[in-house]
Image (cartoon, rainbow, N blue to C red):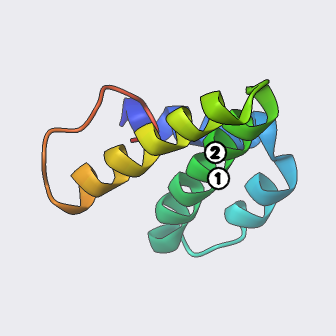
């Protein structure tokens, strides 16, 4: 529950247009859409905040590994969006 709330807040703050669009979705689809948009916000933040391509690459690698762990039902990093 807390993780979903963090995802919702992330999208609401960083991408208000997508947040508003998500509120129009059917309730059974809304959570997944907001989680996907929260991931998009996090990846966008990596690209905006990294001053060197090398750092951005490392951070994106972390996200790739985290997503793979989710897909393989492995222990995931402690991050609200993961």
Q: Are marks 1 and 2 in contact (CB under 8 Å)?
A: yes
Residue position for label 1: 40
The spot of residue 18 in percent (x, y) is 78, 58
**Left or right side of 79 for 19:** right
* Residue occupying image coordinates x 52% and y 68%: 27
| Residue 24 versus residue 61 in the image, above or below | below
Residue situated in front as seen by the camera: 46 or 11: 46
| Residue 29 versus residue 23 in the image, above or below | below
Q: Secondary structure at mark 1?
A: helix
Q: Residue furthest right?
A: 17
Residue position for label 2: 43
| Residue 67 versus residue 48 in the image, above or below | below
Q: Secondary structure at mark 2?
A: helix
* Residue occupying image coordinates x 46% and y 43%: 61
Viewport quadrant of the N terminus: top left
Q: Which mark is residue 30?
A: none
The spot of residue 55 in percent (x, y) is 62, 28
* Residue occupying image coordinates x 42% and y 51%: 64
Viewport quadrant of the C terminus: top left
The spot of residue 77 in percent (x, y) is 29, 31
Look at discs 1 and 2 and give the one toward the viewer: 2
């Amino acid at each position: 529950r807390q993780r979903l709330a963090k995802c919702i807040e992330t999208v609401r703050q960083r991408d208000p247009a997508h947040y508003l669009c998500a509120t129009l979705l059917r309730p059974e689809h809304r959570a997944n859409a907001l989680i996907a948009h929260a991931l998009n916000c996090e990846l966008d933040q990596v690209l905006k905040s990294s001053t060197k391509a090398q750092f951005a690459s490392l951070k994106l690698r972390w996200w790739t590994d985290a997503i793979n762990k989710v897909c393989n039902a492995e222990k995931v990093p402690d991050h609200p969006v993961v």
